[in-house]
Image (cartoon, grey):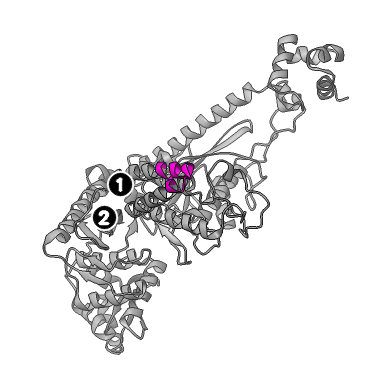
Amino acid sequence: MAIHDLKGQIGRLPEQPGVYLFLSESGETLYVGKARVLRARVRSYLGAGGMSPRHDALLREAATLEVVVTDSVVEALTLENRLIKQRNPRYNVLLRDDKTYPYLELTVTERAPRLLVARRVERNGNVFAGPFMPALVARRTMGLAHRLFGIRSCNEIIDGKRDRPCLEYDIKRCLAPCVDSICSIDEYRRAVGQAQLLIEGRQDELVESLRHEMIDAAAAERFERAAHLRDAVRTIETVRDRRNKMETITQGDRDAFGLKVGPRGAVVLVFQVRRGKVCDRIELVSDATNDPLETETLSAAVQQFYSEHAPAPEVHLPLEIDQDERAALESWLAEQAGRRVQLVVPKRGEKRGLLELASRNAAVAYQTHFGDGAVVSFDALDTLRAALNLPVLPRRIECFDISTLQGRETVASMVVCADGRMRRSEYRKFRIRGAGQAPGVRPQAPVKQVARSPLGPEALGLAPVLADDFAAMHEVVLRRYKKVLEQGGPFPDLLVIDGGKGQLTAAYAALRELGLEQLVAVGLAKQEELLFTRDRAEGLALPPQSAALHLVQRIRDEAHRFAVAFHRRARALRDMRSELDEIAGIGTRRRKQLLTSFGSVAGVRRASRDELAAVVGAKAAEAVIRHFHGQ
């Protein structure tokens, strides 16, 4: 095996903690690992042949060894986690969060905090709650906080010196901390504290606090305030009764990991328990088919999960991991949390019951992702990955199509396919604004002016229309991924462009402007059904019976259907418009009067000034005459 060629280098490795990297002949990073003693850990690979097909493949391909010495195992763990994310090594276990649900961010670092929707948790001193499932729950909770507690939604800098409050105060959705005489900062901060209890799911504490405040308001004969608090208590009690019922007798915070590893990948399911209640369920999915070990998958899941989430005081695992590995993970988690964190494998009682429940949920999730209904999609995605030489399985595919008629009412569509299934809730449609020709894109043929027609735009005095599919594709891709960048994702594993080399070049020009040229895009030509990539001069032809080709065609046809449907609606709206709508001062009522009196737009055009003035008045008649006759 190739690993034996490195035997001399391995014998000279230091007996210190650090990170080691196996690289292929081409310089690709194959595997990243950490060690308490580098020489002993890497030497163990010399006798690792036959452990599993994955280990055998790694040992055959490893041509170069690199090491990074660190001061401690905890530093090695942190460095290993970062290198895995940066280099995406083929033989490491890589898991991803199956969903990107939003969080609510309470900006307690501001003088008058606001409540915002966030897509990721940041260490900026603010309070984050969530994630919320589905995403609509986050916005409903935020709206409830505005309505019940008057948390502001504006972006103003609050200094209390404003003359009068805005409309939000008048409709009772803001306490108006911008006006000191109406609401002091201390009073506003009390409302912020109540909103924090709401978004964190601590409804019992919140209800108790509001009831005491309601009783005090009633005793002080502030009956309107007491009635508002009574309604707030009823609303929160309704929300509390509908919350997750998975509760345990013993109060406490902990995370329970369930694990299911199979021949097609692995699923790790995490139950986050806060104050004795399961408040969240998060899935991590790996599509690695290289036969990973359960302990290795579990260790990787803990590292990758807590690089994005705050660890609980106790983390419950379904099986034992290596003692040295466990000690290193506990030290690293303690640094992340700023307190002690224990990795525990419960053997009995309610804690073990929750672990078994998490494992059963992981098994169900595995069946959903890799079971009979997902096998065909998985095979198609895997075939597509191999054909296009993609670094990862294209689990999320976004497809774009342009629809136009002689350059008029040009629209675009984007559809999303995740794990082989169409996600209708994530479809998007665009009206092309016409930003000009895509930079760096040379049309395959000169862009021609649309032929003149008695009913064309020239007959109405409008500018001639230019039909440029390349510029339209550039515009829609630029607009789409500019917004994705602002939101922080999700980014697709593959872009499918309905068209050939020209449309594909326009799409890459837009991605390059945004610094996203690392995204992979392909063009699918309609006639020959060839796949065009930026690395191949000629199109790639997949076999007609290929499941990958059928999948890409199905996605392309759905994008085309969605674009054509939107274009038909746009044309219908255009046909319902009248030329009279373009005249300043002519609204719906006057347009109806003119058409009723003169029968048609042509009749209005032939009418005299006096006839028009008798119907709509002298000023509007002058506007009509000026529009039609240029006076």
> Sequence-wise, which precedes: disc 2 or disc 1?
1
Residue at 19% x, 55% y is 359
Where residue 580 sits in the image (x, y, percent)?
73, 22
Q: Give the farthest residue toward the right.
A: 631
Which residue is labeled 2 in the image?
Answer: 277
On-image quarter of the C terminus: top right
- Is residue 223 something that shows in the picture? yes
Name the residue beneath numbered marker 1.
243
Percent of width and height locating residue 201 = 35, 53
Residue 391 magenta-highlighted? no
If the image is split into quadrants, where does the N terminus sit? bottom left
The structure residue drawn at horizontal position 17% and vertical position 61%, both measured from the top left corner, is 351
Closer to the camera, 95 or 108? 108
Residue 395 in view here? no
Task: Find numbered disc 1 in the image and state the secondary structure of the residue it sits on.
Answer: loop
Asked if marks 2 and 1 touch (Cβ < 8 Å), the reply is: yes
Q: x, y percentage for residue 347?
A: 12, 65
Instruction: Please tell me which residue lies in front, 322 or 235.
Output: 235
Q: Is residue 432 left or right of residue 142?
A: right
Question: Would you place residue 408 above or below residue 320 in this image?
Answer: above
Decide if residue 64 is on the left or right side of residue 316.
Answer: right
SS majority, magenta: helix
Q: Residue at x 49, y 62 (%)?
A: 108
Q: CA distance from mark 2 to mark 1?
A: 10 Å
Q: Quick one: 562 or 242, which is closer to the camera?
A: 242
**Residue type at the position of mark 2:** Lys
Magenta stretch containing residue 230, yes or no?
A: yes
Query: Start and end of the magenta stretch?
Result: 218-231
